[in-house]
Amino acid sequence: MTVSQTIRRHSLWWVFTCLALMIMPCCTKKTHFCDLEDRDGILMKKGEGLFTGKAWSSDDKTVCMEIEMGRPKYMKIYYDTRRLAGVMTLDEYSNLGNDMSEVFYNKRDEPVTHEEFLNDEEGKAIMEKALIYLQKIGK
């Protein structure tokens, strides 16, 4: 390979790298609960309209809600170690909090009941933290 080919190849690599770095932030920006507003059980992104996608708690790790056309589909809560602590799946036509099925997990990734989860100090703390984050929708 000649010197000019090497320079051209490295130049192209730098151009693609710079383009990727410029594009990446706009594609990876997470939506947080504070970016949404609740209009009678329909979640809207402030200034945009019906929201579809994932919305996260402000710490980017405790709560994630999947939303489709303004309707919550499911919510996942995570331990501080980023392991799954629980999944609440919402009925397709329900409003937030109605007709919900739920599965919770202990630190050993074993399914536990809602009561067992809340009887565990860490489970209870995570649930309280999740509820605080959910109250930030629209604020």
Image (cartoon, rainbow, N blue to C red):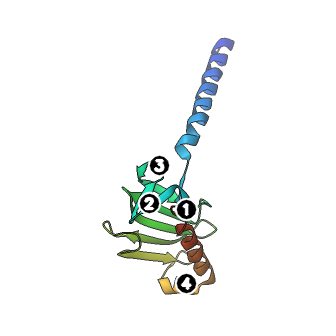
Q: CA distance from mark 3 to mark 1?
A: 14 Å
Q: Residue furthest left?
A: 93
* Residue type at numbered disc 1: Lys
Select label 4 or label 3 by which is in front: 3
The residue pinned by badge 4 equals 118
* Residue type at numbered disc 4: Leu
Expressed as whole percent of the image width and height from the top left, the position of residue 103 reads 45, 76
Expressed as whole percent of the image width and height from the top left, the position of residue 120 reads 59, 84
Q: Earlier in the sequence, mark 4 or mark 3?
A: 3
Can you see residue 108? no
Q: CA distance from mark 2 to mark 1?
A: 19 Å
Tag 4 near tag 3, CB within 8 Å: no
Residue 42 falls in image quadrant: bottom left
The residue pinned by badge 3 equals 47
Q: Nearer the viewer, residue 50 or 15?
A: 50
Q: Nearer the viewer, residue 38 or 89?
A: 38
Select label 2 or label 3 by which is in front: 3
The residue pinned by badge 1 equals 139
Q: Residue furthest right?
A: 3
Q: What mark, if any, has residue 66 been given in the picture?
A: 2
- What secondary structure is found at the residue carrying circle 2? strand
Q: CA distance from mark 4 to mark 3?
A: 37 Å
Q: Earlier in the sequence, mark 1 or mark 4?
A: 4
Q: Earlier in the sequence, mark 2 or mark 1?
A: 2
* Residue type at numbered disc 2: Glu
Select label 2 or label 1 by which is in front: 1
Q: Residue at x 58, y 81 (%)?
A: 124
Q: Earlier in the sequence, mark 3 or mark 1?
A: 3
Q: Compared to 46, does 71 lie above or below?
A: below
- What secondary structure is found at the residue carrying circle 3? loop
